[in-house]
Image (spheres, rainbow, N blue to C red):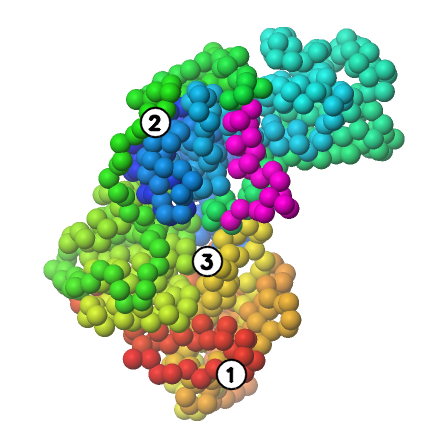
Amino acid sequence: MKQVVQNYKSGELALLDVPVPGCKPGGVLVRTAYSLISTGTELMKVSEAGMSMLGKARSRPDQVAKVVQSVAANGVPATYRKVMGKLDSYTPLGYSLCGVVEQAGAGTDEVKVGDLVACAGNEHALHAELNWVPKNLYARVPDGLAPRHAAFGTVGSIALQGVRRGEPQLGDVALVVGLGLIGQLVVQLLAASGVRVVGADPDPARCDLAAGLGAVACGDPGSTALDAAVAELTGGHGVDQVYLAAAGGGNQPVELAARLSRDRGRVVDIGKCRLDLPWNAYYEKELDVRFSRSYGPGRYDPEYELEGRDYPIGYVRWTERRNLACFLDLLARRRVDVEPLVSHVADFEDAVETYGRLKDGGLKAVAVLFRYPGHAEEPEPAAVAAPTVSAVPAVSAAGTGQGGGKPAPVRSAGMPVRLAFVGAGNYATSMLLPHLAQHDGAELSAVVTTTALSALNAKRKFGFTQATTDLDAVLGDPAVDAVFVVTRHGSHAELTRRALLAGKAVFVEKPLALTEDELAGVLAAVEESGNDRLQVGFNRRFAPLLREARKRFGVRGGPASLRYLVNAGRLEKGSWYLRQDTEGSRFTGEGGHFVDTASWLLAADPVSVYAVTAPGDEHLQVVLRYPDGSTATLSYVTAGPPGFPKETLDLVGDGRVLRFDDFVRAAVYDGRRKRWVGSRLPRARDKGQRAELDAFLTAVRTGGPMPVPLRSLAATTAATLAVRASLAGGAPVTLAATR
């Protein structure tokens, strides 16, 4: 299929062939009939991509701050790879469309194949021939509403939510500043609500358009005529609400709002304009400044948008999906008319040219639509597409599913190991694939993702032979020797199980499993298939500085004590790491790294786990006990200062001390003197990924032992999972020996 994309680094726009997205549960696969260009939001993004690197940095200071933090935590090279990987990638455009349901995933009974739906979301309602859309981001189009009009559903929801935030009443007078696409819709919605509307925009043509759509007066924001019209309509008191639908860096809209508002009026920011509030003016009138967050309640909430968890109507009357349905209803009943806003309809194959004309001013438009091949003005039933399989399947019962797979044959000497990647997110593209793409012993055969564009980006940047969303085809390909599972945590165990049963060597990023049942399912797959070629991404034990420190420390003769402080830091609100119901706790996802490092340093697997935490506190104290009496205390904290190193540890035993400071410095003390001091590496923190990958590829190519015994991988995972059980029971948990 084809999709419009942009390279944020170069500003290049392209219409590319990308894999068809898989139809996952909880959503529908939609074939687009029309998609709408937001001439405000999208063109701002297009223009920003054309800036210099300095210009981009100035426009996004929040992202610059994140880069600085990443440099402090991970060093310059790793941060550079991550930042450039994001910049030099194709990103999607679009967020409002109408199309026909081509395939319905499980849990979407309210629509069926052939239904016409309006779709929303800058990750789902893209300028692409096919899109997978979760259930709370689409609404069925009422009978008789033209698809080209239904494509306005998302921008209509934005305007509608802005009006709701203003709480207009019959007889009010409102000022709409900025008469672009959103402003024109706000004018109509207010007029339909019995509000007299005044419009402000420096473009006379847009003022005339708004007047034709219900505004009682319009004018240039700086004109005295606009002030006079407001004074006449309000008896000199000022407007009841001001809706800021303008964009740009000037402060004129905010100052205009203060001048023309009544005492205790409301100012609602819908667009993205400068908000340097003149304090005296806003204070003296006690103006109520409000923000309108996109489509409405549910926006940016992953549980609502991605998992389909609706808000009870008794508590949240108008969610983003209900706003979408409401706006479609207004269109169908002709309370709002979007046809006068359609400045241009372009065939989808002319998308790049259309963006170019909009950017250089050759096409002046309020709204532009893309028309897709094979569309129909009236919805027609669509043929049922052949089933596609998601790259992240639902978890099935442990030990069931595909079976009979044989371990992949050993590669001939000198032949590269043929790899398939399932997932191509930040970690895969910044920490694993840069090494593998340059590795003589690896051949990147296929990349599988659930979103088409991420697979295409990985193929383009790292040289994969194939990009796809069909996991079954990749697992069934006898040419693939090994599978890398680098998806979100909740899918690791099931994907690993399936790949083992298919006879592939598997490298899975931590964690291996989120529950004891998932771990049992992986081990059952090993037993069923006879395939134990498994590696988990516990990379710390491969870090060169830590390996040298362990060597210098030497062999122990008695028990040792290890202290490991992990200054994990706080996560941003909305991070998928915080979605414990689907991705496990934060320690379950990350803690295996530290358990594995401790066990490797102590050369044994733990026999018991005891964990404590203060009520309501995210800080964990975990004590691991080992067969020879050694102990390891892991302090996992999230509220430490970001400037403090993330990982520090001390190992004490046999009169010696090993001190390790965040992959930058290490030392071994013996008696009263320093026995060894590692060199300081100020620009790089090598956490072992390269050496880990080398070891895995060597094992797969030669058929030799895997870098870490399966018994140890299972023991580390079991110990990590036991932390939750210890916290629940308030007592140590004894670990059973793992087969």
Residue 570 versus residue 332 in the image, above or below: below
**Kind of residue indicated by mark 2:** Leu
Looking at the image, which residue is at 72% across and 17% down? 196
Mark 1 residue element: loop
Q: Residue at x 76, y 21 (%)?
A: 171
What is the CA distance from the residue labelled 2 to the residue labelled 3?
A: 35 Å
- Which image quarter is the C terminus in? bottom left
Instruction: From the image, state whether disc 1 or disc 2 is nearer to you.
Output: 1
Q: Name the residue carrying label 2.
A: 15
Badge 1: few (under 14), some or many (20 or more) residues near its Cα, within 10 Å? many
Up-down relation of residue 15 to residue 621 (above or below): above
Q: Amino acid at mark 3?
A: Thr
Q: Which residues are magenta?
A: 309-330
In the drawing, does residue 391 fall left or right of residue 254?
left
Mark 2: few/some/many CA within 10 Å (<14, 14-19, 20+): some
Q: Position of residue 700 (x, y in %)?
A: 21, 63
As drawn, is 590 to the left or to the right of 441?
right
Kindly report the distance in space between the C-alpha atoms of the residues bearing marks 1 and 2: 58 Å
In contact (CB < 8 Å): disc 3 and disc 1? no
Amino acid type at image mark 1: Pro
In the rendered image, residue 552, in percent from the top left (x then y), is placed at: 41, 78
Left/right of residue 661 with respect to residue 113 in the rendered view: right
Tell whether position 384 is magenta: no
* Residue carrying label 1: 732
Q: Which residue is mark 3?
A: 582
Q: Nearer the viewer, residue 690 or 247?
A: 247
Which quarter of the rendered picture does the N terminus lie within?
top left
Give whichever of discs 2 and 3 has the lower sequence position: 2
Q: Secondary structure at mark 2?
A: strand
Of tags 3 and 1, the one toward the viewer is 3
How far apart are the two marked residues, 3 and 1, measured between alpha carbons?
Answer: 26 Å
Residue at 47 percent of width and 49 percent of height: 307
